[in-house]
Image (spheres, rainbow, N blue to C red):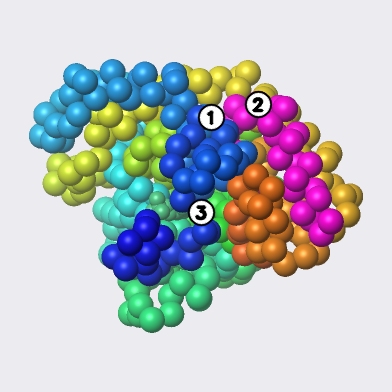
């Protein structure tokens, strides 16, 4: 059996894979089993922050790997303490809980929000409001939080206590909060899986003010928007707000599984010994990777993200077959006249990897993608959008 057959035989059929096998890569270039090379604008879905097997990141990870690969959370280890310090110093938050994925980071945020509310008020104040078209993960609780029915089907009953509001409808959210049963509102400032849809700044700041006035926690899901992706360290920073809790994962460790739930002043004391835990959470190798990623996300790198973002917009906006470009930084969705899947297939044929978000073509390049490679990829994409 070749790899395609073996995969189809033995891997659970949850993924509609593209018909190529990626075997290696370097930065923003990846190679398939036939020796063909691709410019990668997908980064393992916003995970490979500085591309594939980046040498600086690799050194940080392998040095740690040689010293201590894992120890349980029953002991102190240096990388997780240092990473938590960095996350707090860079955001003004107070405490970090480490896990292994976006869904887990959100689960922890939800637990913290509920416990905060129940410790301080009463046990009926447990509801969490999320937005239509959101995506928060695949566990039964984060599915309940996800405001897209297609993901719920076949898996009911989901965790109860979630309310779904229209993005932008602050009055609707205020109405849901009457009766004082709401503990938190959770948002993605740019809805990634929902088609790369940025929230309206007036709505976001209005929501932050309203939540603060009612002691309802504002939770930002920064799993995809975090870690420099939007041109700021965390997506909410584009909006001039400060959430009470944010979750992140995907690009945090630059290509290793690591989730973080980052908790501000208000809820800093909520998690107590035994109230939550994770076997792998805070793994030293993953944390060493994340420290290396965060160190490099300085003002210069973030400006580079914004510059590349402008270049992409200037190239694609108004181009033949392009209705619009949405998103922030290097998290962009291209609304195309052709079927997005056909555009993606044409790009792949011509050596460029892009992915889909709803019916848009989603671009998530490495934050340091060389400008000449990006230009080359955009030429290919532009032609594919035009159907030429
Ligand atoms: C990808 C994603 C998740 C889920 O992350 P996993 O690591 O797959 O569990 C949650 N929220 C958002 C916004 C995401 O983009």
Name the spot of residue 239 as percent of width and height, x first.
64, 40
Q: Bounds of the magenta span?
A: 361-388
**Residue annotated with mark 3:** 20
Q: Residue at x 67, y 42 (%)?
A: 328
- CA gap between label 2 and label 3 equals 24 Å
Q: Is residue 187 magenta?
A: no
Quarter-of-image position of residue 15: bottom left
Label 1 element class: loop
Say if mark 2 contacts mark 1, CB within 8 Å: yes
Q: Residues within 10 Å of mark 3 (few under 14, many from 20)?
A: few
Q: Quadrant of the N terminus?
A: bottom left
| Front label number (3 vs 1) | 3
With 80 as the anchor, is 113 left or right in this view?
Answer: right
Name the spot of residue 362 as percent of width and height, x first.
64, 52
- Judge whether residue 281 can be spotted in this image: yes
Question: In the drawing, what numbered circle is on residue 27?
Answer: 1
**Residue annotated with mark 2:** 370
- CA gap between label 3 and label 1 equals 19 Å
């Amino acid at each position: 059996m070749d790899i395609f057959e073996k995969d189809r035989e033995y891997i659970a059929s949850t993924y509609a894979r593209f018909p190529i096998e990626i075997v290696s890569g370097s930065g923003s270039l990846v190679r398939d089993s036939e020796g063909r090379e691709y410019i990668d604008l997908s980064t393992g879905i916003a995970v490979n922050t500085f591309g594939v097997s980046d040498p600086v990141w690799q050194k940080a990870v392998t040095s740690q790997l040689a010293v201590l690969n894992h120890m349980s959370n029953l002991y102190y280890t240096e990388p997780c303490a240092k990473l938590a310090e960095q996350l707090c110093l860079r955001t003004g938050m107070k405490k970090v809980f480490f896990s292994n994925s976006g869904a887990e980071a959100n689960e922890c945020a939800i637990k913290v929000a509920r416990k905060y509310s129940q410790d301080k008020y009463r046990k009926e104040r447990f509801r969490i409001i999320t937005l239509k078209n959101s995506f928060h993960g695949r566990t039964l609780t984060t599915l309940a939080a996800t405001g897209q029915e297609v993901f719920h089907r076949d898996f009911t009953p989901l965790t109860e206590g979630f309310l779904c509001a229209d993005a932008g409808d602050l009055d609707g959210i205020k109405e849901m909060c009457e009766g004082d049963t709401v503990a938190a509102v959770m948002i993605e400032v740019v809805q990634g899986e929902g088609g790369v849809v940025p929230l309206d700044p007036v709505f976001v700041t209005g929501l932050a003010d309203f939540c603060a006035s009612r002691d309802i926690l504002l939770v930002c899901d920064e799993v995809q928007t975090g870690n420099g992706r939007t041109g700021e360290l965390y997506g909410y920073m584009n909006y001039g707000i400060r959430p009470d809790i944010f979750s992140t994962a995907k690009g945090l460790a630059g290509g290793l599984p690591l989730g973080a739930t980052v908790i501000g002043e208000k809820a800093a004391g909520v998690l107590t010994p035994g109230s939550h835990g994770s076997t792998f959470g805070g793994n030293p190798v993953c944390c060493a990777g994340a420290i290396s990623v965060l160190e490099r996300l300085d003002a210069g790198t973030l400006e580079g993200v914004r510059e590349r973002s402008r270049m992409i917009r200037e190239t694609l906006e108004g181009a033949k077959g392009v209705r619009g470009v949405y998103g922030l930084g290097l998290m962009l969705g291209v609304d195309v006249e052709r079927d997005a899947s056909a555009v993606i297939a044409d790009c792949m044929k011509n050596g460029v990897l892009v992915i889909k978000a709803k019916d848009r073509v989603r671009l998530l390049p490495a934050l340091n993608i060389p400008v000449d490679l990006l230009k080359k990829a955009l030429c290919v994409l532009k032609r594919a959008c035009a159907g030429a």
